[in-house]
Structure formats: C-alpha cells, structure tokens
Amino acid sequence: MTRERDEGDAPFDFRRTFGEFYDFSSPDVRLSDDFDPEQRVATTAAGYGSIWEPGFRGMVSAHHAVDDGPHVIASHDLAASTLTFVARITMPDGATDIRSTTSLVWRRTPGGWRIVREHNSTKVLPAGDLPAVLQQA
C-alpha cells in the first residue's frame, strides 16, 4: 500500500508530492476526477493540485494500492494508460474507502514522460469491502 498522507505529515503540496508525474508547463493539460464534488476540469497541473490541496490538508491519512494495471499503450511521443486503485481516505470524522479507475495520457518531454490528460471515475465502497480488495491487490 502506498501512502500519500499520514497523520502528522507536513501540509499537502500537490507539486511536491506528484510533480514528477504531471506536465506543469503544457497548454494541453485537461485533468478531472468525478470524486471532485464540483466536477471541475483543470487546464493546468497546478490548477488540478488546487482542487485537491484543501481536502488533503483536512485528511488524517490517505493510502492506496493498485488493484489492476497499469495497462499501457505507447508510441513515440504519446502513451495511454489505465489502472484501478483502491484507497482509504481518513478524515477526522471517519474513513471512506474508494475504488477509482484512472485513464491517463502521457507525453514524452525532455524531462521524461508527463501526464497531460487524466480522468478518474470513482466509486465509494461499502464499509468493510476495502480489506478484501487489498488482499487481492
């Protein structure tokens, strides 16, 4: 299981945590996640981070595990990937378990492969379902 946040961590900073994955300079970025209550589509990686930073700052912890994938198709300068992950997000008032399917488009840059498109489709899992999924992951 991978951790994005543990109790007592420094305030969440999207760029510090995920900066190696996203293209922060591309004008072609489109990033969205239906777990966002406002269903926003960010046109910059920094804008996507600003969607998640307030929520992460309020979290006690956030941990995830890849349940399926990644499945990748790559060509010279673009690649597409899909994966499914499960996560437990713990807030001061309790935990929420989710399963998310992620579709990404990556572009080759001088600094390496970076995400320019992302869409996550997320489902909240019934209480008690996450441990079984993690045993299979």
Image: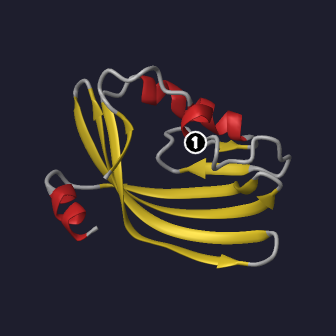
Percent x, y for residue 12? 49, 27
Q: Amino acid at mark 1?
A: Phe
Placement of 43 over or under 82, stated as above or below: above
Task: Please identify the residue farthest to the left as the structure is shown.
Answer: 128
Tell me the quadrant of the picture where the C terminus can be found: bottom left
Placement of 83 over or under 126, stated as above or below: below
Placement of 129 over or under 42, stated as above or below: below
Task: Please give left or right for residue 100 compared with residue 96 in the image.
Answer: right
User: Label 1 crowding class (10 Å Cα cut-off): few <14, some 14-19, many 20+?
Assistant: few
Viewer-closest of 120 and 112: 112
Q: Secondary structure at mark 1?
A: helix
User: Which residue sits at x=69%, y=34%?
Assistant: 46
Q: How many marks?
A: 1
User: Which residue sits at x=65%, y=79%?
Assistant: 73
Viewer-closest of 21 and 123: 21
Toward which corner of the image does residue 15 lie, by quadrant?
top right
Report which residue position mark 1 lands on: 18
Percent x, y for residue 7? 29, 25
Percent x, y for residue 28? 83, 52
Percent x, y for residue 21? 63, 50
Task: Please identify the residue farthest to the right as the structure is shown.
Answer: 27
User: Which residue sits at x=54%, y=70%?
Assistant: 82
Task: Please identify the residue farthest to the front as the structure is shown.
Answer: 111
Toward which corner of the image does residue 40 lie, by quadrant?
top right
Task: Please give left or right for residue 23 compared with residue 70 in the image.
Answer: right
Name the colour scheme.
Answer: secondary structure
Placement of 77 over or under 73, stated as above or below: above
